[in-house]
Amino acid sequence: MTIELAPAVADALAAGRPVVALESTILCHGIPRPRNRELAAEIEDAVRAAGATPATTAVLDGRIRVGLEPAELDRLLGATDVAKCSTRDLPRVVTGGDLGATTVAATAFLAAWAGIRIMATGGLGGVHQGGERSLDVSADLEELARTPITVVCSGVKSILDQARTLERLESLGVPVIGWRCDELPGFHTAETGLPVPRIDELADLHRLHATHHELGLAGMVVVQPPPREHAMSRVRVERLVEGARAAARARRIRGPAFTPFMLQHMAEHSQGATVRVNCALAVANARLAAELAVLAAGAGPTEAERP
């Protein structure tokens, strides 16, 4: 079988215990080494602390893995030749026997294949600036339109057209729900001015998640702002994005290299602030996803019983 479950993930799924899928692109293409290894441990520890099993997905030597052992994770995060794998890239990376880090789209696809219904990430892909002309739109959106998964994230990546992305998700029938917030978070910032429906109680979020999937619908997105102590102002983020976009145009950076270049440029010109908020929100999203998974599995307290 091309797709392999880590023993801990297979055991948890067989026993009906909660599992949270985690994408690996953020670790291989979003966070510099060696901070990426520290972040991977923090994310997986947050899932475990909430009572769920983490299932980080990746491709190792042409083998698709749902759940990684520590040595496998170390190898992936230390390598410099890791392909960025969306769903369309999986067959090519598998047949080439290569290393691959999975995007939101590929992780959602693999999680659904394994029977995992909840995943966590940092920020969602979406419509790029000028996407109405270039048709440069992340495969994340189309995958969510056909895959039964609930994605916990901090909104749409700052470098994208967040308003058009929200509109596209609406057109695709993918609901976007604010966890204790009234507007779509902007990844590095809590502020976008784009309204979303709000839910404040975990039990209510669980009922919505359960009803959505019981109806046979596909993806759902749950958004929460980055932690307040790390969140950046909207104005500062917009300035960083514009500076990075100008640099990308000057160097003719396009295609899969565009997002990593933008994130690196923003990190350098914010003295690492964007990396710090990225790490903080990734851990917070993993924690919320695990809490939801625990409740969905019937293995945890209700919101009223939480400390």
Image: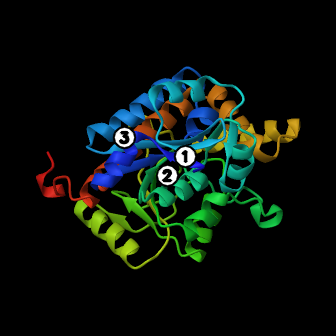
- Which residue bears the numbered disc 3? 8
Q: Name which of mark 1 and mark 3 comes first in the sequence.
A: 3
| In the foreground, 32 or 230 | 32
Q: Judge whether 100 appears above or below 71 on screen.
A: below
| Residue drawn at 57 percent across, 51 percent down | 1
Q: Name which of mark 2 and mark 1 comes first in the sequence.
A: 2
Where is residue 54 drawn, in percent x and y? 39, 42
Q: Name which of mark 2 and mark 3 comes first in the sequence.
A: 3
Label 1 environment density (alpha carbons within 10 Å; few <14, some 14–19, many ≥20): some
Q: CA distance from mark 2 to mark 3?
A: 38 Å
| Residue drawn at 64 percent across, 35 percent down | 29
Q: Is residue 136 visible?
A: yes
At label 3, the amino acid type is: Ala
At label 1, the amino acid type is: Arg
- Which residue bears the numbered disc 1? 234
Q: CA distance from mark 1 to mark 3?
A: 41 Å
| Residue drawn at 42 percent across, 29 percent down | 41
Please identify, in this view, whether the residue under mark 2 or under mark 3 is nearer the observer: 3
- Which residue bears the numbered disc 2? 191
Q: Are marks 2 and 1 in contact (CB under 8 Å)?
A: yes
At label 2, the amino acid type is: Glu
Q: Is residue 201 visible?
A: no
